[in-house]
Amino acid sequence: MHDEISFQQKLQEVQDFVATRGRLFSEQIEASGHVDKNVIEELRQRGYFRLTAPENLGGLGFSMHQYLEMLFYFAQLHGSLRVLIHVTNSLWRSLASKASQQQLENFVRPFVNSEKWITFTLTEPHSGSGADLKTTARRDGDDYLLNGEKWMIIFSDLADYFLLFCRLEDSQGSEGTLAFLVPRDSQGLTIELMQDAMGVTGTRHGHLYLRECRVSASMRLGEEGDGLTVAFQGFLDPSRLAIGMTCVGLADRALQLAVQHASKRVTFGKTLLERPTIQMWIAEMATDIEAAKQLVFKAAADFESGLTIARQASMAKLFASEMLQRVTDLALQIHGGIGYFKGEMERIYRDARMLRFEEGTSETQKMTIARSVIRQYRQNQS
């Protein structure tokens, strides 16, 4: 964790980048539909891909709370830039959680330093993202043979390795789940890039087909049965906090744009900002944003204290993602018809919708929260 002076210096740098180069990059990405390599390289050189990793892995070692404060501003950029920063600052935890010393040297350090690209590979077209996994693995000597499909896998165009989750043949539930680093050129792996998404343009997703895909046992993270532990405790819980703060930052930008527009738009001799209805909406938006921010920060404090945060992370992600929909809807309404035309407000409205799905839908978060509440109730009754 950095001292307050060094953190504030980095935070100011981030704010300056977002207000200048970041805005320019955002416009270029939206116009071209792709993220240029020079943009990725600048983010790498600025250290934005290794903000959270510890220094002994080559990272900058900022705390979760410090990172979330920076992410608040990164979230106000184009969705593809935010995703790049978010994934690289989250995935190392999964990789490091069960990695051997050799894997730390061969994969985790190179990932933190952007020398190797690795992407999270959980979602399947015919199952839920968890204990319902259908992709299987079968031991074959010193290798495993993988069969199944994965889709909507982000950075499938960039990834050198896929951190892929599956299960042993004939296993059920969380038992028998595995985590592998699957090389891009693995025999039996086919990667098809999917069509463009509604928002977050420039970020490519892939559909992976595994047909007797041969992977060395040395590429397994942890033991047989550790797969979902690597996926959820290593990545998803802290990542859901990051998604929560992403929603807060993006909603704040939508509010800024709405107030800016309302201060200039004049109807019947008055600005929209003078209208009581608009003022009520602004008050609702600001309150919603602040409530979500505090929920995220509370969960972050628990995380930094070493507590299990599955329930708190789901609460933060649930509230913040649904808050973002309310805020962006009102922000677009304040803009009126002009907000529906191509531009920053229109892009924010589209990008915001993905955050309802990212790291689990609202329904998934509610299931996690409900199970935690019920479990606690039963424990208190016993």
Image (cartoon, rainbow, N blue to C red):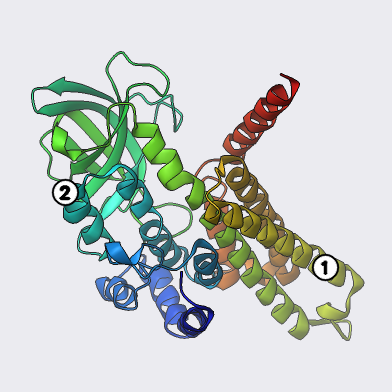
Q: Given contact means CB atoms under 8 Å apart, are the residues at marks 2 and 1 in contact? A: no
How many residues crowd mark 1 within 10 Å: few (<14), some (14–19), many (20+)? Answer: few
Task: Say if 169 sits above or below 222 in the image.
Answer: above
Q: Is residue 124 visible?
A: no
> Which residue occupies 29% across, 64% down?
56
Q: Is residue 146 left or right of residue 33?
A: left
| Mark 2 → mark 1, Cα distance in angstroms | 54 Å
Q: Position of residue 295 (x, y in %)?
A: 68, 55
Q: Quadrant of the C terminus?
A: top right
Q: Residue at x 11, y 29 (%)?
A: 143
Amino acid on which the number 1 mark rests in the picture: Ala
* Of the pair 276 and 105, the residue shown nearer to us: 105
At 39% across and 33% down in the image, what residue appears?
Answer: 228
Give the residue at x 60% y 57%: 301
Seen from the viewer's position, the closer of residues 53 and 44 is 53
Q: Which kind of residue does numbered mark 2 sit on?
A: Gln
Q: Residue 34 falls in which quadrant of the image?
A: bottom left
Q: SS class of the residue under badge 1?
A: helix
Q: Which mark is residue 102?
A: 2
Q: Earlier in the sequence, mark 2 or mark 1?
A: 2
Q: Circle 2 sits in a helix, a strand or a loop, which is it?
A: helix
Circle 2: is it few (<14), some (14-19), or many (20+) Cα within 10 Å? few
Q: Quadrant of residue 32?
A: bottom left
Residue 364 in view (yes/no): yes
- Where 263 falls versus 351 (above or below)? below
Could you say where residue 61 lies in the image, as x and y percent from the top left? 40, 67
Q: What is the residue that sits farthest to the top in this orientation? A: 170
Residue 283 - label: 1
Above/below status of 271 relative to 329: below
